[in-house]
Amino acid sequence: MAIAQVVGGNIFLSMAGCMYQNYGHSKLLPYLTALSQQDISSVIAGTSNPIFQSLTPELKNVVIEQITSVMANIWAVMIAGSAINVVLGPLLGVGVKRWDVELEVGLGKKILAVPPAEEKV
């Protein structure tokens, strides 16, 4: 159950990262026409970047406003993913039949890889 929740969180985080890069490019492209796609990606990465530092103060303000707006929109994706996790998390494992799996460990010993489900009375 915990693995499914972690994987779900990672999927939403990856989606948000891709959306951040793509949406950031589309928002900054009209303002940074002289820069290449790679340079725009560098500007999106942060304000300590030398390419960002070389921009004019007016252009820096515009870039910061656009990146802030992108972050505000992408934050909603993580909130939605977390809400789905909270709602569906308790349902993980409901109605799933547990199987006992034996593993053979050195010297012919066998152990249960998945503990048997408790019998309900």
Image: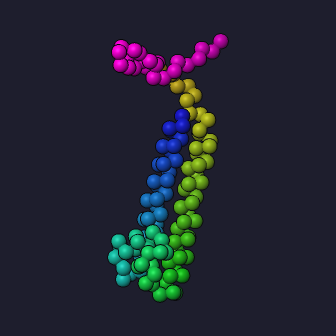
Left or right: 104 as drawn, with respect to 97: left
Q: How is the image coloured?
A: rainbow
Vertical order, 44 against 3 (above or below): below
Position of residue 80 measured from the top left corner of the image (x, y, whole percent)? 58, 52
Depth order, front residue of 29/13: 13
Examine the rendering and report whether any part of residue 30 can be seen. Answer: no
Question: Which residue corresponds to the image point at 40% horizontal and 71% vertical from the top-left?
Answer: 42
Left or right: 88 as drawn, with respect to 10: right
Q: Quadrant of the N terminus?
A: top right
Depth order, front residue of 39/19: 39
Q: Residue furthest front?
A: 107
Q: Quadrant of the C terminus?
A: top right
Vertical order, 21 against 58 (above or below): above
Question: Which residue corresponds to the image point at 50% horizontal and 78% vertical from the top-left?
Answer: 63
Question: Which residue corresponds to the image point at 62% horizontal and 43% vertical from the top-left?
Answer: 86
Examine the rendering and report whether any part of residue 86 can be seen. Answer: yes
Vertical order, 11 against 19 (above or below): above
Depth order, front residue of 107/120: 107
Position of residue 88 measured from the top left corner of the image (x, y, whole percent)? 59, 39
**Which SS type dominates the magenta stretch?**
loop
Question: Which residue corresponds to the image point at 63% horizontal and 15% vertical from the top-left?
Answer: 120
Q: How many marks?
A: 0
Q: Is residue 14 magenta?
A: no
Q: Residue furthest right?
A: 121
- Residues rendered magenta in the picture: 100-121
Position of residue 18 measured from the top left corner of the image (x, y, whole percent)? 43, 59
Position of residue 118 measured from the top left corner of the image (x, y, whole percent)? 59, 17
Q: Is residue 106 magenta?
A: yes
